[in-house]
Amino acid sequence: MYGIMSNQLASAGTDDSPVPLCSVLVVDDEEEFIHTLLKRLRRRGLECEGVFSGEDAISRIRAREFDVVLLDMKLPDMDGNSTLVEIMTIRPDTRVIILTGHASVNEGIEGMKNGAVDYLMKPVEFESLFEKLLVAANKTRYLKSSPVIDTRK
Amino acid sequence: MKIHSGTVSLKTLELKSSGSYYARQKQLFVLVVIIVSVVPLVIISLTASHYYKKSWLEKTALELSGLAGSRKEIIDLFLENQENLLSGFAKLYSLEDLRVQGNLEKLFRAMNRSGVIVDLGVIDQHGRHLAYVGPYKRQLADKNYAGAEWFAEVMRSGRYVSDVFSGYRNEPHFVAAVTDPARTWIVRATINSELFHSLLASAEVGPGGDAYIINRAGELQTPSLLGGGTLSAGELAALESKDRSSVRVTDNYIYATVPIKKGDWILVLKTDINTSLAEFYMARKRDMLIIAGASLIILTVVTLLVRSMVNKIEEADRKRMSLNNRMRQVEKMALIGRLAASVAHEINNPLQMISNQAGWIDDLLDDEDDKHLKNYDEYRNSTKKIRGNVKRAGEITHRLLGFSRSNDSERKEIDLNRLVEDTASLLANEARAHRITLEYFFKQGLAHVVTDASQLQQVFLNILNNAIDAIGQDGVISISTRDNGGHVVAEFVDSGPGLSPDSIKKLFDPFYTTKTPEKGTGLGLSISFSIMQRLGGDLKAENRKEGGSMFTVMLPAN
């Protein structure tokens, strides 16, 4: 499944395909994590940006629209949930997936209440993360009546 | 906090190791109460008894002394009377009158109304009998008294009263003799000393008492009332001070002595202490019995009280200790939970990074031509293994994080019997493989429980897995449920070897395991314990007397 999907998506993400599958904003305090993740997501044709703090995340959200936000709950400047609330206030349609090394179920539930669509715990396998990103993005697009991809296959 | 709980556990060990501690406490309490209650009672009683006896003796001695005084007066008066009578004759009559037998007989009859005078004689200054009235006329007719001691004495001092002697007559008697004023003749009377006997017999000295008269040589002048002919050396020693009135208390007797007959004789009254104290001894015996009875009652009551008191203390101590132990366990779990959570979190991020990097290599390998890359398959294999191990490590950290997960998780009403059975059925195959029988003893109509079913299921699974591992092959796991006050209880009993003392202590500690590293992480029961704490219930493990171990899961009923 991985092989098929990656091949298909890899071709969709190459430079000769100008339309990205979807746009993702990755918010995490670990630079290295973001770098690798972005490389892998771009390789699969996603248009993505990475920021290291809640403030940056909010300013990026203000600046433009993203289909999905991948949000770490532990940020250097503000806590994940307030960042989440802020994002949802600015752009209620944004799909937010929480990805955290933290164990607190409470925090997860809090996040879901605040509008997050999913809650993932590190370490998460890239394949399942990628799938969840696509599902979420698809829903965002669907809300806007312009679905771009069918992940049901 | 750490130090405090350490101290508690030390104390616990100490108390448990010395099982005789409470027995010693009991003994100590009883001893103290006896010392402060019974001992004073006995001391008071003994002191009172001592002084009572002393005063009793003093009183008896005083009475005896008084009695002796009054007897002395009577006897002295009697002797004086006899003397005066005779001296009256000597003054009233002339020798010529008295030497006439008829006159003397008349006189004898007149003065002998009382019958105390045995005979009467008139003796001249040479000791010859001039006249005699009495029963021994024949024997005494020719008697010459010139050599007799009494004769010399009477001629010298004018009057004389002898000691008691048997004389020619073999009857105790004494002689009173008086001269005329010119000392030319003597009137002499023999007086029956039986009179003294009756006089003394009338002295009430009580049973075991005695009354007698002795002379200065210690010879009895009257028979002892008790019939003794002579006095023992011990008795004489007791009568040492013969010169004046005295009272002497020996071990067994009280002696009251008083000199009579101008000090020639001594009147002795003797009373038996034991006899006279009989009443006192009786009273004392009664007192002793009462005190003994009271002491016995005190002893019994105190023993019972102390026993129940110390038992209560022991019970309270035990409860406190077990509570302390559980508190420590809970504290420990909380601490470990926080530690585990932070460690897991710190590890999760690097794990994610490792996973990502391995994935990136995979992505890049997609671009490579596997024909040209010599070790293409090895790279693929390696990244796969890296990701596999990251997954494994992730599972451990996720389980560790289970400690600190608080439980706003889903709570709903559950049927405990159903949940237990469902959980057990998950392991039915494994149990069958080990030839282990599962038995259910479900109480129907259990109280309702609202709780997190999946977490509870995890607890049951952990317990059942342990039970299967403990039994190994061939055995029984019996599961029962019941209501217990405000709790619903599920008990899991296995027929395994039971828990070692070490296991019982560390059972719920994280990473404590008796299994091989492949089979167990040592987290199952500690996580179960913290789950039960979070659910407001409890988890306990113990060995059963019948063998095997029993795990008890308690949940508050709603």
Image: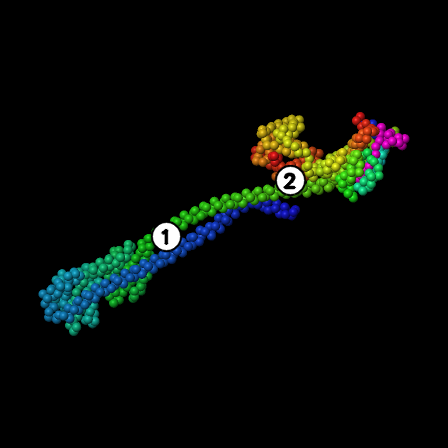
Identify the residue under disc 1.
B284
Taking the image as shown, residue A92 lies to the left or right of residue B373, namely left
Callout 1 amino acid: Arg
Q: How many marks?
A: 2
Disc 1/disc 2 C-alpha distance (Å): 67 Å
Magenta-highlighted residues:
A7-30
Kindly identify the residue that appears in the image at 29 percent across and 66 percent down: B243
**Vertical comparison of B12 with B110: above or below:** above
Is A19 part of what is drawn in magenta?
A: yes
Q: Nearer the viewer, residue B69 or B473?
A: B69
Q: Residue at x 58, y 29 (%)?
A: B445
Q: Residue B328 lies in what quarter of the image?
A: top right
Instruction: State yes or no: residue A118 in magenta.
Output: no
Q: Identify whether A148 is placed above or below B260.
A: above
Q: Position of residue B77 (x, y in %)?
A: 22, 65
**Viewer-proximal residue among B544 and B127:** B544
Nearer to us in this view, B549 or B33 = B33
> Disc 2 residue type?
Lys
Disc 1 with disc 2 on a shared chain: yes
**Residue that numbered label 2 is attached to:** B506
- Measured from the top left, where is residue A95 in percent x and y? 79, 34
Instruction: Name the image quarter holding residue B492.
Output: top right
